[in-house]
Amino acid sequence: MGNASVRILVVEDEALIRIATVAALEAAGYSVFEASGADEAISLLEADPEIHVVVTDVHMPGTMDGLRLAHYVRGRWPPIRLLVVSGVPGGLHSPLPDGALFLDKPFGEDRLLHVVGRLVGA
């Protein structure tokens, strides 16, 4: 699967981090969509069955945090690959969904692209 055919949804409430993450993924050739919270992310996932990867921050305002979102996505759209990120030490308050990867913030662009590459089998 070429990068351009891989559709990634970035869910991050911090605008500057979201912009930088989206820019890095787009520069690597991925098709990238963005949401500032779980509710917006779920709406995008419902509208686009071709999203392959969800990259979500753990700590977000709204009805559910990123870890709950990851579990929701795993249950509703099992083929979607998941990357959960957090800048809070010990940021995981419960286990990751099966098959999800975790990345500590701050992370460099190279590390992000390496982990996303692992998720999509690049």
Image: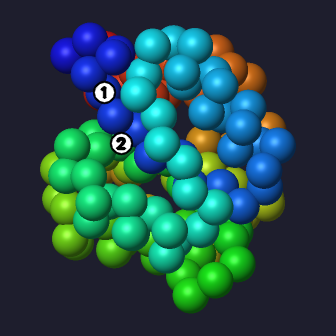
Q: Which mark is residue 6?
A: 1
What whole-number distance in Å separates the C-alpha atoms at marks 1 and 2?
8 Å
In this rendering, does residue 92 appear at all?
Answer: no
Kindly tell me whether residue 45 is visible in this rendering. Answer: yes
Residue 39 % position (x, y): 49, 76
Marks 1,2: beta carbons within 8 A: yes
Q: Quadrant of the N terminus?
A: top left
**Residue tagged by mark 2?**
53
Q: Which residue is outermost to the front?
A: 47
Is 116 placed above or below 99 here?
above
Indicate left or right for 61 with 88 as reference: left
Q: Compare residues 50 and 80 and report the one nearer the observer.
A: 50
**Mark 1 or 2 closer to N-term?**
1
Q: Residues within 10 Å of mark 2 (few under 14, many from 20)?
A: many
Residue 66 relative to residue 21: left or right: left
Question: Vertically, is 27 above or below 81?
Answer: above
Q: Is residue 91 left or right of residue 76?
A: right
Camera-nearest residue between 43 and 76: 43
Q: Amino acid at mark 2?
A: Val
Outermost residue, bottom side? 63
What's the residue at 28%, 40% (across, down)?
52
Image quarter of residue 27: top right
